[in-house]
Image (cartoon, rainbow, N blue to C red):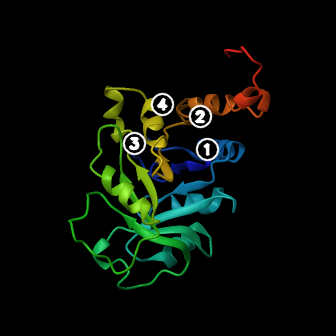
Amino acid sequence: MFDRIVIGTANWGQKYNGVQLDRQEIKDILDYCTCTGITMLDTAEEYGSEEIIGELANSSFEIVTKGSGDIEGSLKRLDRDSVYGYLWRTPNVFGKQNLIVEAQKTGLSLYDPPVPGTKWGMRPGIIQVPYSLMDRRMESLIKYWRQTNVEIHVRSIYLRGKCLKKTNTQECLAFVMTNRFIDRVVIGVDSMKQLQENLDFVHKWNSYQCDDEEIIDTRKWKKGSRN
């Protein structure tokens, strides 16, 4: 399940929600990601984190960045020849100009549901939207887009802490991860400790996996067993 997690980097190069991570904390987070199988980072040209990713993240990390078409500037800051995804913040020009060839997939970063009947210049490869226990405006669209083979990334799953007034981080994350139409879940973290705590339930879920067919194949249970 860890390969569905994407680390948001809005607070790597600037203060975001009152927090900015230092380089040692970022290094620790990247090491933790490598050990657990988290392979994707989410950034944007305005975050100020592209340069830090280019400096600290090795080539095993896939990158999704966002902007208004200046892919060359992002690649220079990221110190890469290409990225996994480039998401436009300007849907009205998506697919109509500046074709992005340096990204495996191009797509859209949306804040609001599109007006019914909206047509883009091309079909997105990825659509990233806000989605959480509280904000379900995109729920039906997420299902529709995924069924048309668009890769779905969701962000703002904690709604900058507003969801946490009603529940906890693990429940917020579990809610979005159990939605089968969501491919990737972007989470921001304020510290290495917080990241570990947020993902603790995933470790627990993974620990329950069993490969012993004498246990998981009911046909092999002994007669009379109720386990």
**Marked residue nearer the N-terminal end (1 or 4):** 1
In the image, 38 versus 195, the foreground residue is 38
The residue singled out by tag 4 in the image is: 170
Residue 32 at x, y = what percent? 67, 41
Q: What kind of residue is marked 4?
A: Gln
Q: Is mark 2 on a helix, strand or loop?
A: helix
**Marked residue nearer the N-terminal end (2 or 1):** 1
Q: Is residue 183 above or below residue 165?
A: below
Q: Is 163 on the left-hand or right-hand side of 13?
A: left
Question: Pointer 2 and pointer 1: residues touching (CB < 8 Å)?
Answer: yes
Q: What kind of residue is marked 3?
A: Ile
The residue singled out by tag 3 in the image is: 157
- Spatial distance from mark 3 to mark 2, Cα to Cα? 16 Å
Residue at x-position 46% and y-position 37%: 173
Residue 141 at x, y = what percent? 32, 57
Q: In which quarter of the image is residue 128?
A: bottom left
**Marked residue nearer the N-terminal end (3 or 2):** 3
Q: Is residue 116 above or below residue 157?
A: below
Q: Quadrant of residue 146?
A: bottom left
Camera sees residue 12: no
Q: What kind of residue is marked 2?
A: Val
Q: In this view, does 155 lie above or below 43?
A: above
Viewport quadrant of the N terminus: top right
- Spatial distance from mark 2 to mark 1, Cα to Cα? 8 Å
